[in-house]
Amino acid sequence: DFFISMEVGKVILDENQKAAMDEVNKRYKDKLGKIKYTSIIRNGYPATEIIDFIGENNFDLIILGAHGSTGLPSIFFGSTAERVVRNAPCPVLTIRSKT
């Protein structure tokens, strides 16, 4: 059996989140140029967290990456993108990845 206390687990999670955020900012800073953006990390089910975040911030439009290569919506969008498109309180523009 393996046990990590909640406090130790939170420290590890916080450190991993910071490392992930630093990587995202490093990777996309040059690509986004002068576009203003904010990076956040939330814990939870991705579609639910995205939809909740949209509702909390009153966005006019969401741009969301999607993946897949078939014509079937649930496969093309993936489960997270599909749920966001179906449940978001504002329009969602999906952009298919190149891979």
Image: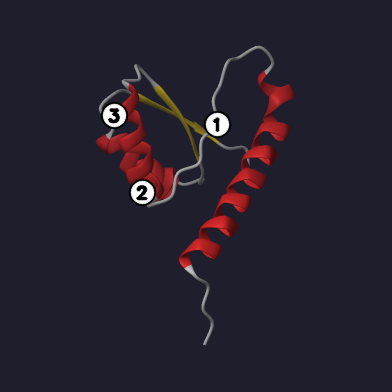
Residue 77's quadrant in the figure? top left
Residue at left 45%, top 44%? 42
Question: If you read the primary sequence from the N terminus, does the residue marked by circle 3 or circle 1 appear first?
Answer: 1
**Residue 12 visible in the shown view:** yes
Tag 3–tag 1 contact (CB < 8 Å) = no
Q: Which residue was labeled with disc 2?
A: 74
Residue type at mark 1 is Ser
Classed neighbour count for the residue bearing mark 1: other residues with Cα under 10 Å, few (<14), some (14–19), many (≥20):
few
Residue at left 69%, top 16%? 33
Q: Which residue was labeled with disc 1?
A: 39
**Position in image of residue 90 (x %, y %):** 29, 23
Of residues 5 and 85, the one nearer the viewer is: 5
**Residue 73 visible in the shown view:** no
Q: Which residue was labeled with disc 3?
A: 55
**Position in image of residue 12 (x %, y %):** 59, 59
Mark 3: which secondary structure? helix
Say which quadrant the C terminus sits in.
top right
